[in-house]
Image: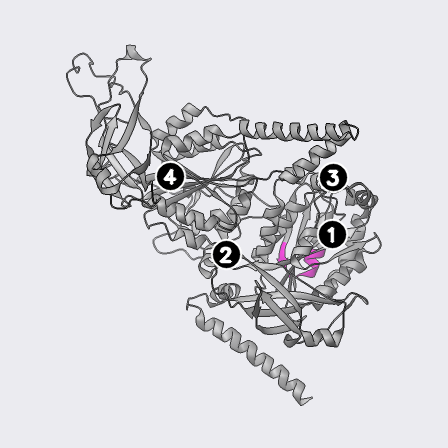
Amino acid sequence: MFRSVLRQFLRFVLYLLLVGSLQAQTSQTTNDSQETSIKLRADLVVIDAQVIDKRSREFIRGLKAQDFDLFEDEAGQRIEFLSQGELPLSIVLLVDVSPSVRPVIEKIREGALQSLTRLNPEDEVALMAFSGWTELIQDFTRDRQLILDKLGEALEKKGSGTRIHEAIARAARQMRYVTNPKGRRAIIVITDNQGSMDRYRDAISEEEVRQTVMESGATVCGIVVRSLLNVADAIIFQHPEIQERSKRTSVNPYAEQTGGEIGGAGKDEINARLGEMLDHLRSRYGLGYFSTNQNYNGKFRRIELKLSADARKRLGKGIVISTRQGYYAIDSESEALLAEDDPPEEKNPDNRTQPLTDPSPSSVSAAEPKGAAASPDKLAVPPDAELLVSEPPQPVSPPHPYSHLVMLDLHAINRKTGAVADNLVSEDFELYDNGSKKEIIHFSRGELPLSVVLLIDVGGKTPYVMSSLRRSIAQWLRLLGPDDEIALMGFGGSAALIQGFTKDRKLIAAGIRDFADTARQKGVGNGQDRTVAVFHAAEYMDKAANPISRRVIITITDDSPRSYTTAESGATARVLLDSRSVVYAMVTKGPRPSRKRQVITSAAEGALYGLGNPISIAIHIFTKMGSRALLDAILKDRAFGQMIQKTGGAAVKIDGEDATENLVFLLDQIKKRYVVGIIAPDAPTVTPSDAAAQDSFHTLKLKLTSEGLKRHGELTVTTSQGYYLRVAEPSEDSDVANDAGKPAPKNPR
């Protein structure tokens, strides 16, 4: 008895020491609890595990830390604490209300009414309903009666379709609002598991859902309501090719990735299954450790948990451990940037989700704290009083020091070594404007601020890339100077502004964090029209960017080919050159069938149409593969490539894991580019009768002088191909004939 009490006391002391050391490492602020939470998430890795004897299906209880071996990326880790059923639960109850589930809706309600009574007082529950849409019915609460009342409201909703992927992603994102930061998190999905048939047409990809779920730290569990559709699926979708093409979306892959469980239930068994699942969640072990890998780079770390040799010998074979496959190591600075200040959604009295507000700076206003008393200089005014409001003085913009110059970025690389030339001077270059040599008036490197538009594709594999950039956002934001500004735009078939130009790193992080949801709410639509997106980005750049900054559009997209665009490439090039924007691209591999799958598909079709004739099958394979290769070549997005070439930009290939490193590299190269300025030619002034007169395109050619070649060798110089010289319109009250001898105003752009 004494030993048992002593062990409990020592365990409690160890826990206090752990928390104390974390608090000592945390910077002292007015909100100590928030800072401690951030450090806990950054440094302390908490996982939960289910240990079952697969022969008896019984839970193994009473295990100690020394009964487990824990590995992170194959490196052994020391388990600092272990508990069973002690940590509070934060549960999102995600209920399917699609037509195929409606016959058992009342049974689901009865089961939940009885099962939720098993929760402990400190446990919290959020309620969501889904069909072809997903709706938050009730945010996290410990009020059981409120959940039960809201459950009746949720089950009365009707919809068509079953978007399981989107629902699980929304539930995972809801985990940002838990009030138990040290608790264990779970998503329980009650569904018939009959999700959308074509995974490739879902609004959200499986990879994006997987990223979101793994980042949330939640365990996904499913109660699958049995129906005739389940039986039909098991028969129809046995063939691997059919599974690859048309298998329904389901809860299963996310339960497997997070160490959750799936349980089947007849309509009269829902109560029992839900109760068992809550008991199972309560019986899971909670383990905590400090990773030996202190490089928090936002990348995925694989976890392996197994019984120690002594425990295996004692318990015998057949013990199964279920836990999540890993976690993302996010640094504390990125965590702080991405932390929620206020929930991004407002709810009306009946709790229906409202759209996000426009995140552009113009829509942001300072508000009085709720309940704040009126200050002496803000006294209440009687409603019948006459107010005399004077207009505040308008700030005077400083004169634009480069308005009379044609400014262009250039990048110079040594052809032999591939190294960036970092010691160039203006005397190393000759610049020709329509064949005429021009004097270089301005020459600098890294001095002017940046205006960057991150133009992000919302489809394909790009969300996977964005997940990587989000998890390590502090790493690439460090490349920006205090005067640099960023805007966020999303695109699909159309484009939308997500966040206007800002220097506020917190606003940028919030835009990245909620990017996918905001872009979809703004209706960017399906498709992938990059040229239209670049056109809108250049237009916004010309209107909103700092006038003296260097303008950069970084397009994050995948390599899925496009067959058409609604934009005219000439008009897009014009607005790009007018806005002085340089286009860059970060391109990841888009979703497309593997070569192996293409061969198998072609062989299957050849066997079907060729009646098993081997020669016919072979001809069909080669014909089909050849036509697909030709189609891929035809569908390449040449218009987008021309935009990069005309503006002197570049494209880099990336994948999800190295996206941050590539963006850091790209921003570093952009900041190191040279800026060259020449005096613009006089813009010709035309009379009203010359209405058909058009702006003229001026071709720019930059090359090294002979002295520059001697000093630096052969360099590859990348820069803009030219600019448009606008015609100058005379004022209405001027006499063009009398002013013919006067110099025309300079208006190069």
Q: CA distance from mark 2 to mark 3?
A: 36 Å
In this view, the residue in front, 350 or 250, is 250
Residue 45: percent from the left, percent from the top?
A: 56, 66
Left or right of 214, for residue 268: right
Query: Mark 1 sits on what residue?
Result: 190
Categorize mark 4 by other alpha carbons within 10 Å: few (<14), some (14-19), many (20+). many
Which coloring applies here? Answer: one colour
Q: CA distance from mark 2 to mark 1?
A: 32 Å
Q: Assign a secondary structure to mark 2.
A: loop
Residue at 32%, 13% in the rendered image: 691
Query: Mark 4 sits on what residue?
Result: 552
Residue 749 appears anywhere in the view: no
Query: Mark 2 sits on what residue?
Result: 298
User: Is 143 situated above or below 725?
Assistant: below
Categorize mark 3 by other alpha carbons within 10 Å: few (<14), some (14-19), many (20+). few
Residue 34: percent from the left, percent from the top?
A: 49, 64
Q: CA distance from mark 1 to mark 4?
A: 47 Å
Residue at 78%, 65% in the rendered image: 54
> Going from the N terminus, do you reach mark 1 or mark 3 first?
1
Query: Mark 3 sits on what residue?
Result: 242
Q: Which residues are magenta?
A: 139-148
Q: Is residue 316 magenta?
A: no
Q: Amino acid at mark 1?
A: Ile
Q: CA distance from mark 2 to mark 4?
A: 26 Å
Q: Quadrant of the C terminus?
A: top left
> Going from the N terminus, do you reach mark 2 or mark 4 first?
2
Q: Assign a secondary structure to mark 1.
A: strand
